[in-house]
Image (cartoon, rainbow, N blue to C red):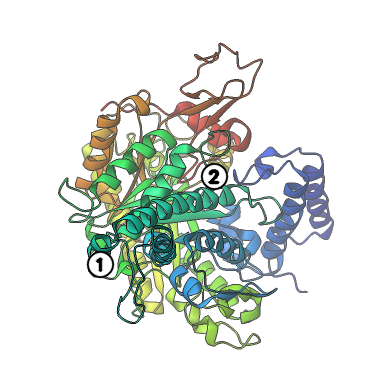
């Protein structure tokens, strides 16, 4: 194998690097590496085994696979390649799974075929199996974009069986199967004809659907299989099915989430997203409004669901009434792949392919005023260098895309054979996936807009309206670049508001080593995510939402905004609801509210816990206090043990936003 990148020419140095990689993992010396992903316990046996493979795969890609300019840009600390360990083998990123198709037609996991389900209990059990099967075909997240619509037919089947059982039990007569038509919970004629059986069937179906929802949530929190130690990044979107069966799915998922896991713990997965749509669930006279209220109540108690805004302009433009596959949905990591220049402007059956992130702060330091080398920011030099590194980031995405295209269908067996990636079912196992992947997106992300502005102009975009305009111009410029490159390369190239997790402290650490600790720029352990107003900046909830909302329209690969609620969310549901509705009115595309959930392991109390549990007076030195926080779009078990040092520092700095 030829060494592509002469940046590393000394083979002794290369050997030392490999040995050091192994030693740091075996001896748990590098917690930054072991805690790169909060969803993986990197200090466990399986976590370390996974890290061995992951770290060597990154090393191999840098030395033997990646373009030289891309590797140099990583060393320059300006471009970051996400999931680098998957680069050389051509794996793809997130996907929205067509659950309706797989449940309707059945599927094969590779070890045997699975028949279509005939009840909601079986259907929800199969949803967990499908999530598990698909997550082994990819990295990133697996998502259901319309789980209420996908599961409603199986609630209907359950109701039908229960109605027939009720007719026998109460001796109310027989159904004429040739004339009765489809049996559903909305059939008032059947309710009038068979009142006792109908009531019995309704009660039994509600009970079974709730049990199924509890089973699904328990399964998705316990089936750690990815890389031997990760719970799959699962997301479910719901909220707009107005049929009684779809409403029951939504209601049951929310009830099961509020009840919590076995001992009442808050579920970590699936990430839940409630889809908000005017005319469906946003006003008291709309059919699913009560479910929206219940979703807000659930989020105040369990941090989920997050809220997706179907009426935001960039989402509404693809919406077709009556086609839930065109409703905006997302994942915890914000993947947004609704638009497709090749016509598949829907979500099921495709996803994001890969993404690279730009360190805007480094460019700001080099061309701004903060180092004292100039009195006026060198904007021309900034944009000239931005163009260079955007080209390099894109070059990396296109190079990786060619590797992904060359992979045989059998390499992502379940995804292609079962048509989870739309069209994959028509490929021979030995056939390359090729242009089929063109329906996915390639995304360029960014981090540290706030610190970049501080370095350029002395203030960030939350502090000064002129700087805010400069910040907006910068992100607009990046979006225009992506749009131009989409036309040039005839691919879906999109702009991403990066949800930095493992990356959150990496850029910062190296910039601080180069430039020192610069107030407001490099003096913390992390850079602020994407376009967010810094977590340590005092600002009202409304103002933060207002300032960030405009950026959502620019980030067509995904973005999230959130605020930190001041006080115990569970005791102030009215304020909680008001904040959600304000964010939706400001056209924020994807939104959530953070609030601390602490849990005392001695008595099970949940709420805000200081050093001492207010319920049983146990001290944190004597019992474990599980402190649940949102890391990006998703939760972790305990941020003190699962977050990396940079993300822990960010959590400590988070100020509450007054309402």
Residue sitting farthest toward the top: 617
Q: Can I make out residue 246 in this image?
A: no
Residue at (38% x, 42% y) in the render: 368
Q: Quadrant of residue 644?
A: top right
* Residue 427, quarter of the rendered image: bottom right
Residue 395 is left or right of residue 243, and the answer is right
Residue depicted at x 61% and y 51%: 231
Q: Is residue 172 above or below residue 605?
A: below
Give the position of the C terminus as an image quadrant.
Answer: top left
The mark that comes first in sequence, 1 or 2, is 1
Where's residue 400, x and y in %? 56, 71
CA neighbours of label 2 inside 10 A, class few (<14), some (14 to 19), many (20+): many
**Pointer 2: what residue?**
507
Relative to residue 292, is residue 391 depicted above or below?
A: below
Q: Is residue 542 above or below residue 388?
A: above
Nearer to me, 14 or 495: 495
Is residue 282 left or right of 555 when viewed as pictured?
A: left
What's the distance in space between the residues labelled 1 and 2, CA to CA? 38 Å
1 or 2: mark nearer the eye: 1
Specify the quadrant that holds the N terminus: bottom right
Camera-side residue of 25 and 202: 202
Residue 333, position as x, y percentages in the image = 46, 53
Residue labelled with disc 1: 319
Helix or strand or loop: what does disc 1 sit on?
Answer: loop
């Amino acid at each position: 194998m030829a060494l592509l990148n002469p940046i590393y020419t000394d083979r002794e140095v290369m050997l030392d690097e490999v040995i050091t990689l192994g030693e740091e993992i075996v001896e748990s010396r590098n917690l930054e590496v072991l805690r790169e992903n909060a969803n993986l316990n990197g200090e466990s046996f399986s976590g370390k085994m996974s890290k061995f493979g992951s770290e060597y795969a990154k090393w191999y890609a840098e030395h033997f696979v990646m373009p030289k300019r891309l590797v140099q840009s990583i060393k320059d600390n300006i471009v970051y390649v996400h999931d680098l360990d998957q680069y050389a083998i051509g794996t793809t990123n997130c996907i929205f799974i067509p659950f309706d198709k797989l449940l309707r037609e059945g599927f094969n996991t590779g070890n045997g075929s699975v028949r279509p389900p005939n009840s909601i209990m079986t259907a929800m059990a199969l949803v967990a199996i499908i999530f598990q099967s698909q997550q082994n075909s990819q990295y990133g997240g697996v998502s259901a974009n319309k789980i209420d619509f996908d599961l409603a037919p199986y609630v209907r089947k359950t109701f039908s069986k229960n109605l027939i059982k009720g007719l026998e039990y109460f001796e109310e007569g027989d159904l004429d199967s040739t004339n009765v038509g489809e049996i559903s919970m909305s059939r008032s004629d059947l309710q009038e004809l068979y009142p006792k059986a109908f009531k019995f069937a309704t009660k039994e179906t509600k009970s079974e659907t709730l049990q199924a929802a509890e089973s699904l949530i328990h399964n998705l929190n316990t089936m750690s299989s990815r890389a031997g130690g990760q719970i799959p990044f699962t997301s479910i979107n719901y909220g707009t099915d107005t049929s009684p069966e779809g409403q029951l799915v939504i209601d049951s998922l929310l009830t099961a989430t509020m009840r919590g896991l076995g001992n009442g713990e808050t579920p970590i997965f699936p990430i839940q997203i409630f889809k908000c749509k005017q005319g469906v669930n946003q006003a008291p006279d709309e059919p699913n409004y009560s479910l929206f209220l219940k979703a807000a109540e659930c989020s105040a108690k369990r941090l989920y669901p997050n809220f997706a805004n179907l009426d935001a302009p960039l989402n509404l433009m693809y919406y077709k009434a009556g086609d839930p596959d065109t409703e905006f949905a997302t994942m915890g990591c914000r993947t947004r792949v609704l638009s497709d220049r090749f016509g598949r402007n829907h979500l099921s059956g495709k996803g994001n392919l890969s993404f690279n992130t730009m360190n805007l702060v480094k460019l700001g330091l080099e061309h701004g005023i903060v180092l004292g080398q100039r009195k006026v920011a060198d904007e021309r030099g900034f944009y000239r260098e931005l163009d260079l590194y955007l080209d390099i980031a894109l070059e990396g995405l296109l190079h990786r895309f060619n590797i992904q295209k060359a992979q045989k269908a059998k390499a992502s067996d379940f995804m292609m054979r079962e048509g989870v990636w739309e069209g994959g079912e028509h490929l021979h196992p030995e056939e390359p996936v090729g242009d089929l992947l063109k329906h996915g997106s390639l995304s360029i992300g960014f981090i540290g807009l706030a610190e970049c502005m501080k370095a350029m102009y002395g203030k960030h975009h939350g502090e000064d309206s002129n700087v805010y305009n400069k910040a907006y111009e910068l992100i607009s410029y990046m979006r225009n670049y992506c749009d131009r490159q989409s036309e040039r390369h005839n691919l879906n190239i999109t702009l991403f508001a990066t949800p930095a997790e493992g990356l959150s402290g990496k850029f910062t650490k190296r910039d601080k080593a180069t430039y020192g600790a610069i107030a407001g720029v490099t003096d913390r352990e992390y850079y602020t995510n994407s376009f967010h107003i810094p977590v340590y900046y005092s600002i009202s909830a409304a103002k933060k939402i207002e300032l960030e909302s405009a950026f959502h329209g620019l980030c067509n690969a995904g973005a999230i905004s959130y605020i930190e609620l001041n006080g115990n969310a569970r005791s102030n549901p009215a304020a909680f609801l008001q904040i959600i509705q304000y964010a939706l009115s400001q056209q924020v595309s994807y939104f959530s509210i953070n609030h601390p959930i602490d849990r005392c392991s001695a008595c099970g109390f949940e709420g805000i816990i200081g050093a001492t549990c207010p319920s049983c007076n146990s001290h944190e030195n004597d019992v474990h206090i599980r402190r649940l926080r949102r890391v990006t779009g998703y939760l972790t078990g305990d941020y003190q043990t699962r977050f990396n040092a940079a993300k822990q520092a960010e959590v400590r700095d988070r100020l509450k936003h007054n309402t």
